Image (cartoon, grey):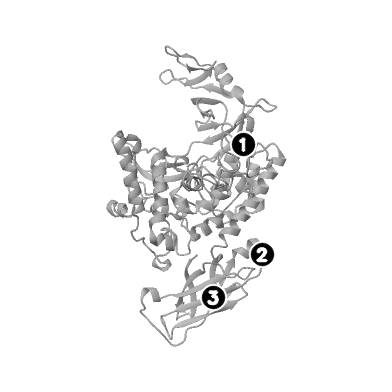
Amino acid sequence: MGAASRHDLARPRRVDLEGIGSPVLRLAVPIRLLLLLACACAPYPRVEPWEYAPRPMADTLPILEPEETRESLIYSQVHGFGEAIARGSNTKRLVHGPPPSWNADPFDEVANSTWFTNRNGRRALAPEEIRRGPLEGSGPVAPLKVTSIKSEGVSPGFNVEDATGQRWIFKFDPPEFWELSSGAEVVATNLFWAAGYNTPENYIHAFDPADLTFEDDPEDPLVAEFVEDSVAVEYSTNPEEDQRQLTMAVFTRHVLDRYPRDGSGRVRALASKFLSGVPKGPFEYIGVREDDPNDVIPHEHRRELRGLYPMAAWLNHTDIKAGNSLDMFIVDAESPNGEDTPRTGYIRHHLIDFGSALGSSAVRPHDARHGNEYQFDGGAMLLRTLTLGVYERPWEGFEEGPYPTSIGYYSVDNYNPADWRSNMVNSALINRTPADGYWGTKLVMSFTDEQLDAAVAAGQYSDPAAAAYLLRSLRERRDATGRYWFAQVSPLDAPRVEGGSLAFDDLWIRHFGGPASYRWRLDWDAADPDLEVGGTTNAPSIPLPVPEGRIDADPDPDERYAELEVWKVFDDGDEAPRPATFWLEWDPGSGAWTVVGARY
C-alpha cells in the first residue's frame, strides 16, 4: 500500500503542540483536532471473514530508519477527549457502537505481528515459562558500571553497563513500601508478555553496592543533583566551577542509603534490560506512525490495542498511555551501514513500565479511586457541578481495608470490569467493542491458578501472606472479568465440523460451569430451495443440514456461504445479547461443510 493510500486510512496527523509558540495557535490546534474527531463519521472498511485467508501481517518489510519521536501529553489528551466527543456526536456510533477492529482475522483472532505474538491463548505455557516471562538470561553480571544517574523526582535510579557490556536501568521501590513497584512491574510484565505483548526483560535483582563503579569519561562526566540542607547541589565526576566532586561515598549517601539491605548487604532493585534495536519513541493509541509505511491500521482500530482493555483492567494497569510504550527500530542484517547511507529495518512495538499496576501506583499504593476515574474526568466533574456536589463518585467513601504494604490496594471489591478507567483517556481502549472485550478476556481467562502462582513467584515477595493476598486478588479479578465480558457475547470458541455437526467450546461452561443450552438459526440462499432452519439444543454442537436440490454455481459473494447464528442461553434462561456467527462453505464433491469464519 502506498503512502497516499495509507494516509487516507489514517486519522488526522500528529501535531507537535509543544513546538507551537503562539497562545492563539495553541488554542486553535486542539479545537481543530476536536472538530476533526467529532466529525469522524466517514464509513469504516468492512472485511467479511471469507474475503481473505489467514496470513501473517506483512509489517516487517524493510523501511528507511525513521526519526525518534517524543511523547506529547497534550496530543494524547486532546485526541482522547476528541474521541469521546466523536462517540457522543456520531449517530451511527450511538446506535451501533464503534466499528469492528480492522485487523481481526477470519476467526476474529489476530495474526502474529510486530505488535503481538499469540502465546498463552494459543498454547498453554508451562508455569515455569510464566515465572521466567520474557527473560533470556539471568540478570546483570557484576561488576556494574554506572553510566547515568536520575537523581530528581520521587523515584531516583541509574543506568549501568554490566560485565558483558549489556545496558540496564535500575529502579527502586519507595523505602516505606518496599517491594511494591518492583514486584508489580515483574508480575505484570510476565503476564502481559505471556498474553502476547512485547515487553522488556525485567528482573528482581539484589546487588552488592561494592560492585558499583563510575564510568570514567572526562569528556562526558556523570552529573547528578542532590539536595543538601534544602539547597540543590550539583555533583560531577569531572567537576567544573560551582560543581562538587561526585564520589561513590556521595552517591551511596544520597542514593543507596535510602534503601534497606538484606542480610548480605545487598540492595533490591528492578533491573530492566535495554530493548534490542534503536529507540524511536512511543507509539500513540490513535492514528498511525506516519514515517512507518508498514503501519497502515489506525491504532484505535487495532484489535491488540482495543483488546488490551480487559488485561489492563484485570491487572489495574492504570498508567497505560503512549509514554509507557516504546517503538524499537530493528536494523536488517543486510542493511547498508555507511555513514551517509540510511539504514533499513522495521519497527517493533513494546509496552513498558508496569510499575503502576496491581496495587502499586509506583511511589505509593493505589487507592480506591485508581481504576474508577480518569485523572481529569470531565463526566464526574460535570455531574458534581450539576448536582451542586451531591453526586457521589463510585469510589468515594469506599473502605479499602487492610492490605500488605508490599502489594498495595488490589482487590475485587472495588473493581468494575464494565467501566474500569485508566489514569488518562486512551483512544484505543474507549473504542472497544464487545468482540474486542471478548478477545482480550480470552487472554485473561487463559491463565490458570497454577500459572498465576508462578507469576506471583516472579515478584519474589519476602512475605508469604502478601504473595497469597496478591494471588487471591488476581484470581478473583480474573473471574470477575470473565463473567462480565463472556456475558456480553455468546462465548463459543474454536468452531469446527465434527460428524456432520458444528461443534464449539463453550467458554462459560469451561470456566464457570452450568448447563449447555443454545438457540440457533442457519440461513443459506445459494441452495434452491433456500436453507432456513433453526432450533434449540442442549449440546455444544449444532446439527448441520444437507442441502437438497440445485445449488447456485456462481452465487453473489454474500450468498456463497451459509450463515449460522448461535445464542448462548445462560443458567437463568436469558440469552446472550449477541450471537456467535459462523460462516460455512458447502463442498458438493465431498458432501461436507467447512467453517470459513466467525464473528462475536
Q: Where does the image place residue 28, in percent across and percent down from the top left?
A: 31, 42
- Tell me where residue 363 appears, x and y as whole percent: 57, 34
The answer to which image quadrant residue 328 occupies is: top left
Q: Residues within 10 Å of mark 2 (few under 14, many from 20)?
A: few
Question: In the displayed image of the protein, which residue is found farthest to the front?
Answer: 388
Horizontal and vertical percent for residue 465? 72, 41
**Along the line of sight, which residue is nearer the eye, 146 or 389?**
389
Give the Cα distance between marks 3 and 2.
Answer: 21 Å
Give me the residue at 52% from left, 69% from top: 579
Q: Secondary structure at mark 1?
A: helix
Q: Residue furthest top?
A: 241
Asked if the residue at tag 2 contacts the one at tag 3, i.e. Cβ–Cβ closer than 8 Å, the answer is no
Report the amino acid beneath label 2: Gly
Q: In this rendering, is residue 366 above or below 248? A: below
Q: Is residue 301 left or right of residue 163?
A: left
Q: State whether residue 280 appears in this view.
A: no
In the drawing, does residue 417 fall left or right of residue 13? right
Does residue 102 appear in the picture of this structure?
Answer: yes
Instruction: Give the secondary structure at mark 3.
Output: strand
Tag shown at residue 180? 1
Q: Which residue lies under the disc numbered 3?
A: 520
- Measured in 3D between alpha carbons, the distance from the residue under mark 1 to the one under mark 3, in whole angstroms, is 50 Å
Question: Mark 1 to mark 2: distance in Å?
Answer: 35 Å
Residue found at the far bottom of this picture: 549
Which one is nearer the viewer's eye here, 332 or 460?
460
Q: Is 162 situated left or right of 467 in this image?
A: left
The earlier-in-sequence mark between 1 and 2 is 1
Residue at horizontal 31%, vertical 39%?
Answer: 342
The relative height of residue 233 versus residue 64 in the rendered view (above or below) is above
Q: Which residue is mark 2?
A: 513
Q: Nearer the viewer, residue 27 or 365?
A: 27
Give, as a three-letter code, the residue at label 3: Trp
